Image (cartoon, rainbow, N blue to C red):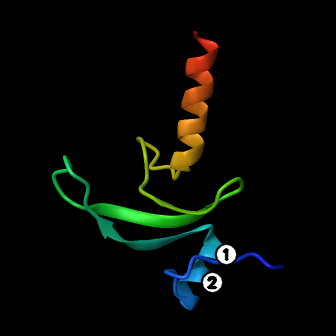
Amino acid sequence: MSEKMDPRIKLLERLKLQLSGHVYVGDRFKEGWKEPIPHYAFKCPKHGIIIDYPHGYNQRLECPICREEEKEVIEQATE
């Protein structure tokens, strides 16, 4: 197994990521948000280790790159 892990993720966090599928990496703030929200590292099958925040009512972790790719496919299909 020669997969490279994100160097920003510590050893214990890497273990948690492999065992649970995601690991908390801290609260982050974006322009337009009222307050920082928790972000998690998780593995996208297509894009590798991704850091993002939970989305929707079910608080699901979604790869933002995959979301953009799906959005482009839908836009092309409706043209």
From the image, tell me which residue sits under label 2.
15
Which of these two is toward me, 10 or 57? 10
Determine which quarter of the picture holds residue 78.
top right
Indicate which disc residue 77 carries. none
Q: Quadrant of the N terminus?
A: bottom right
Which of these two is toward me, 53 or 32? 32
Residue furthest to the bottom in view is 11
Q: Is residue 18 above or below residue 65?
A: below
Q: Residue drawn 46% across and 65% down?
A: 40
In-image side of 66 versus 39 (left or right): right
Q: Residue drawn 60% across and 81% down?
A: 14
Neighbours of disc 2 within 10 Å: few (<14), some (14-19), many (20+): some
Q: Amino acid at mark 2?
A: Leu
Q: Position of residue 33 (x, y in %)?
A: 20, 50
Q: Residue drawn 52% across and 67% down?
A: 41
Q: Amino acid at mark 1?
A: Gln
Q: Is residue 70 above or below residue 75?
A: below
Q: Position of residue 46 (x, y in %)?
A: 70, 53
Residue furthest to the top in view is 79
Q: Position of residue 11 (x, y in %)?
A: 57, 90
Q: Position of residue 52 (x, y in %)?
A: 45, 58
Q: Residue drawn 61% across and 18% down?
A: 76
Q: Secondary structure at mark 1?
A: helix
From the image, tell me which residue sits under label 1.
18
Decide: marks 2, 1 in contact (CB < 8 A)? yes
Q: Is residue 58 above or below residue 17?
A: above
